Amino acid sequence: MIWRCGARVFDLAERTLVMGIVNVTPDSFSDGGRYLEPGAAIARCRELVAAGADLIDVGAESTRPGSLPVPAAEQRRRLEPVLVALADVPVSVDTSNAEVAEAALALGACAVNDVTALADPAMAGVVARAGAGLVLMHMRGTPRTMQADPAYGDVVAEVADFLRQRLAAAHAGGVARECIALDPGIGFGKKVEHSVQLLAATSVLAALGQPVLVGASRKSFLGALTGESDPARRHEASLAAAAIAALEGARILRVHDVGATVPVVRIADAVRAARSARAR
Ligand code: HH2
């Protein structure tokens, strides 16, 4: 299995990718305000690459529960100096705005992480023209409303159906299948039990045939399970979730603590390889 992101082709057959998070925002739930200044964001990206990140997800709009959209011009203003300075680094841009995505791809980003899975009708065309990578994520509602009592009959089946349908839409919009990764959207319109069920069912989503990305790092369901209210102190819980996701078939992990996650996924990769060798 590969994930094509423009000229970069990630080989996912044996290695789970570690995607480092850098939010160039004043208000993200975990690192809000720390990397709003371009110099701080660039230094953080370089630090995560040195710690072993395969790519960096740079966002200029928080999607934490209750947050509001950030205008395209402001997202571009925050992103541009960072992207220019990181031309040598594989970067995905965390945006659901096609204008922002187009500008970021022109500045060298190799993938678009779209938490709305193509809500902007221009997005598929922008990604397709660039031959860029694309992450399609499941969300129930919008960040402003999503945690207002989300309800599902069968959360795994509903998320899988949604992702199957968005995959078809992306493909119909010209995005090559080998460029597309799918993401259950942990914490996006999900109660604690929904996030746990989705983590447990990573292999069900992997069976859709695309690389699965899981973003569980520091999220509130980990706090609910461990009693830790401070996101920055959900370190061990995040590593446990990373190990489980990788073992269950996630091929890309979106994390804040890259250096600690890399050895965890190497162990998970080795165990997964041993498991599949035994099954052959
Ligand atoms: N989670 C967040 C943001 N973007 N993208 C994908 N594909 N999957 C995720 O799980 C995901 C995501 C939320 O985390 P963070 O970026 O740390 O916070 P904020 O949205 O407040 O900036």
Image (cartoon, grey):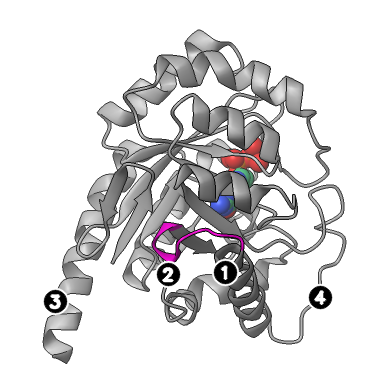
The answer to whether mark 4 and mark 3 are in CB contact below 8 A is no
Q: Residue at x 60, y 24 (%)?
A: 24
Which quadrant of the figure has residue 188?
bottom right
User: Mark 2 or mark 4: which comes first in sequence?
Assistant: 4
Q: Which residue is mark 1?
A: 167
Q: Residue at x 46, y 54 (%)?
A: 237
Front-most of residues 140 and 13: 13
Q: Which residues are magenta?
A: 173-179
Q: Amino acid at mark 2?
A: Gln
What numbered label is drawn on residue 210? 2
Mark 2 or 1, closer to the camera: 1
Disc 4, ligand 1: is the CB inside 8 Å?
Answer: no
Specify the quadrant that holds the C terminus: bottom left
Question: Where 81 falls versus 259 (above or below)?
Answer: above
Marks 2 and 1, how far apart at CA: 9 Å
Marks 4 and 1, how far apart at CA: 23 Å
Q: Residue at x 65, y 64 (%)?
A: 138
Classify mark 4: residues with Cα within 10 Å, few (<14), some (14-19) or many (20+). few
Q: Which residue is mark 3?
A: 274
The answer to whether mark 3 and mark 2 are in CB contact below 8 A is no
User: Mark 1 or mark 3: which comes first in sequence?
Assistant: 1
Percent of width and height locating residue 268 = 25, 64
Marks 2 and 4, how far apart at CA: 26 Å
What numbered label is drawn on residue 151? 4
Q: Is residue 100 magenta?
A: no
The answer to whether mark 4 and mark 1 are in CB contact below 8 A is no
Apparent side of residue 63 relative to residue 13 in the rendered image (left or right): right
